[in-house]
Amino acid sequence: MKVLVPVKRVIDYNVKVRVKADGTGVDLANVKMSMNPFDEIAVEEAIRLKEAGKADEVVVVSIGVKQAQETLRTALAMGADRAILVVAADDVHQDIEPLAVAKILKGVIDEEKPGLVIMGKQAIDNDMNATGQMLAALLGWPQATFASELDIEGDHAIVTREVDGGLQTIRVKLPAIVTADLRLNEPRYASLPNIMKAKKKPLEEKTAADFGVDTAPRLEVVKTTEPEQRKAGVKVANVDELVEKLKEAGAI
């Protein structure tokens, strides 16, 4: 079985995001970029399936700017077999919207014919949490979102997913879309020998036009602002005063 894993290049989660002075978006100048953490978890899970003998090949795909090659090489160093880069933007500030990403991924899947797609539940830059669901709808495939456990039994995937009320275990027929949650696994670090090997692994480059997808944005960002500064706390002398303050704040 072939497993396909989409990965996205985002601002590294350790970096403090800065808004441009003119409020037109986030400043990406000289900012460290890395693989979206949820996608990294998805790559790790695909590699574990291969190591367990439940998958034959792990293919990673990224959609965006040419610089996403670095992200794909990271996935290859972790243990993926080959990579596909779909160049869909020239400007690093252009974020490809979920519907366009899903349409391109459908084109890739139609060509690659994987038995399973594992992807992060959302990207930490826009937090839309929509691509996996849209892709499942376009393909007409079953989906299992927010996965915290995954196992393959024959032609079915057994997925434990995180829901508001706790955990839910479902059984979906393959091929299917699975989106990874935080507790699915802990990704490995790529070793130096694997980083060197990754440079020789195949990385195919395509464009959005190859799949007939228009990536022009449908949404317009009107303004981007920094979150409000947290206000200083207030010390109270006793419980009665605390209760009164909570009432004033509408907390009770």
Image: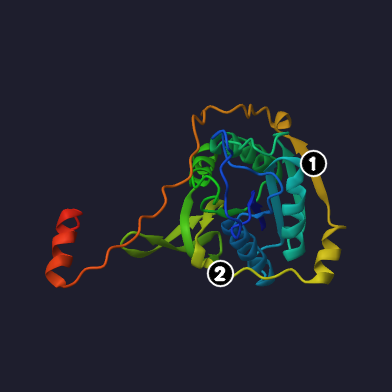
Of residues 216 and 156, the one drawn nearer to the viewer in this rendering? 216
Q: Give the number of callouts.
A: 2
Check the picture and name the quadrant holding the C terminus: bottom left
- Asked if residue 212 lies left or right of residue 70, the reply is left
- Amino acid at the residue labelled 2: Asn
Residue 84 in sight here: no
- Expressed as whole percent of the image width and height from the top left, the position of residue 43 reads 64, 60
Look at 63% across and 41% down and name the residue there. Answer: 105
Look at 52% across and 60% down and name the residue there. Answer: 156
- Name the quadrant containing residue 110: top right
Residue 100 in sight here: yes
Check the picture and name the quadrant holding the N terminus: bottom right
Q: CA distance from mark 1 to mark 2?
A: 29 Å
> In this figure, which residue is indicated by the disc labeled 2?
185
Look at 72% across and 59% down and name the residue there. Answer: 75
- Expressed as whole percent of the image width and height from the top left, the position of residue 116 reads 60, 54
Look at 85% across and 64% down and name the residue there. Answer: 197
Figure check: 237 above or below 124: below
- Asked if residue 30 lies left or right of residue 14, the reply is right
Dot 1: few (<14), some (14–19), or many (≥20) neighbours within 10 Å? some
- Amino acid at the residue labelled 1: Glu
Of residues 82 and 27, the one drawn nearer to the viewer in this rendering? 27
Q: Kindly state the secondary structure of the residue where label 2 is placed.
A: loop
Of residues 13 and 127, the one drawn nearer to the viewer in this rendering? 13
- The answer to the question of whether label 1 and label 2 lie on touching residues, with beta carbons closer than 8 A, is no
Figure check: 123 above or below 49: above
Q: Kindly state the secondary structure of the residue where label 1 is placed.
A: strand
> In this figure, which residue is indicated by the disc labeled 1?
205
Looking at the rendered structure, which numbered label has been put on residue 106? Answer: none
- Asked if residue 164 lies left or right of residue 107, the reply is left
Tell me which numbered mark, 1 or 2, is placed earlier along the sequence: 2
- Expressed as whole percent of the image width and height from the top left, the position of residue 155 reads 55, 59
